[in-house]
């Protein structure tokens, strides 16, 4: 029997079932495109209500670059989890951790009101590790990119 296709968009309720992150550290609001085992496009709506804007920076709110990278890593985790689907329920409870970031580049600031598009492509999967090629965009313009490695944690 063929697998049931995933209904898009994937909302935050389903995202919370797939990722362990919670407020204020859940940085993905919606998944709008998915090619299992290949690519995901997710959204983070950036608002002035984000707690990090209180100190970064007062009077000139800018989303910290490390949080843009974290949002990309979370989108990568969703790519892995959604690709597993119902085929591997034993893996859906596993935690994957960010272990390496290479080639991080920031080309523009992310500010309140931006709709951050998180595009993540799976470069390769080796045993319990996934290497992702990531790009963050606002209004179609790339604001950040990186290669991110995540590994399954020991538990």
Image (cartoon, helix red, strand yellow):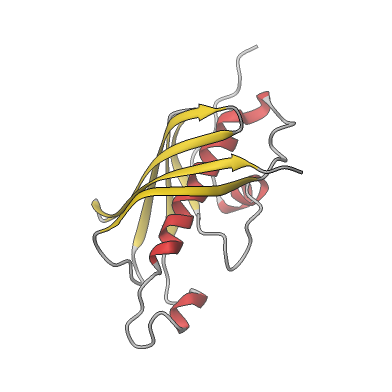
Q: Is residue 119 above or below residue 88?
A: below
- Residue at 51% from the left image edge and 37% from the top image edge: 79
Instruction: Give the left or right position of residue 15, taking residue 105 as reference.
Output: right
- Residue at 32% from the left image edge and 83% from the top image edge: 60
Q: Position of residue 76 (x, y in %)?
A: 49, 42
Indicate the quadrant containing the N terminus: top left, top right, bottom left or bottom right.
Answer: top right
Is residue 120 at all visible to an observer of this figure? yes
Q: Position of residue 50 (x, y in %)?
A: 48, 73
Quadrant in which residue 48 is drawn: bottom left
Is residue 36 at all visible to an observer of this figure? no
Q: Position of residue 44 (x, y in %)?
A: 44, 57
* Number of marks: 0
- Residue at 72% from the left image edge and 42% from the top image edge: 154
142 or 42: which is nearer to us? 142
Q: Is residue 129 above or below residue 30?
A: above
Q: Is residue 151 above or below residue 145?
A: above
Q: Is residue 34 above or below residue 73?
A: above
Instruction: Give the left or right position of residue 66, taking residue 77 as reference.
Output: left
122 or 127: which is nearer to us? 127
Indicate the quadrant containing the C terminus: top left, top right, bottom left or bottom right.
Answer: top right
- Residue at 49% from the left image edge and 46% from the top image edge: 75
Q: Position of residue 47 (x, y in %)?
A: 42, 71
Q: Residue furthest top?
A: 1
Instruction: Give the left or right position of residue 145, taking residue 128 as reference.
Output: left
């Amino acid at each position: 029997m063929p697998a049931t296709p995933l209904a898009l968009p994937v909302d935050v309720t389903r995202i919370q079932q797939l990722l362990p992150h919670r407020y204020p550290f859940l940085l993905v609001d919606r998944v709008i495109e998915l090619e299992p085992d290949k690519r995901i496009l997710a959204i983070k709506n950036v608002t002035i209500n984000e707690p990090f804007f209180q100190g970064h920076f007062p009077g000139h709110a800018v989303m910290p670059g490390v949080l843009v990278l974290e949002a990309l890593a979370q989108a990568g985790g969703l790519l892995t989890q959604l690709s597993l689907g119902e085929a591997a329920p034993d893996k859906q409870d596993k935690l994957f951790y960010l272990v390496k970031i290479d080639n991080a580049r920031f080309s523009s600031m992310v500010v309140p009101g931006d709709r951050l598009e998180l595009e993540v492509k799976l470069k390769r999967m080796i045993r319990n590790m996934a290497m992702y090629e990531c790009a963050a965009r606002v209004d179609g313009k790339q604001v950040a990119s990186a290669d991110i490695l995540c590994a399954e944690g020991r538990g």
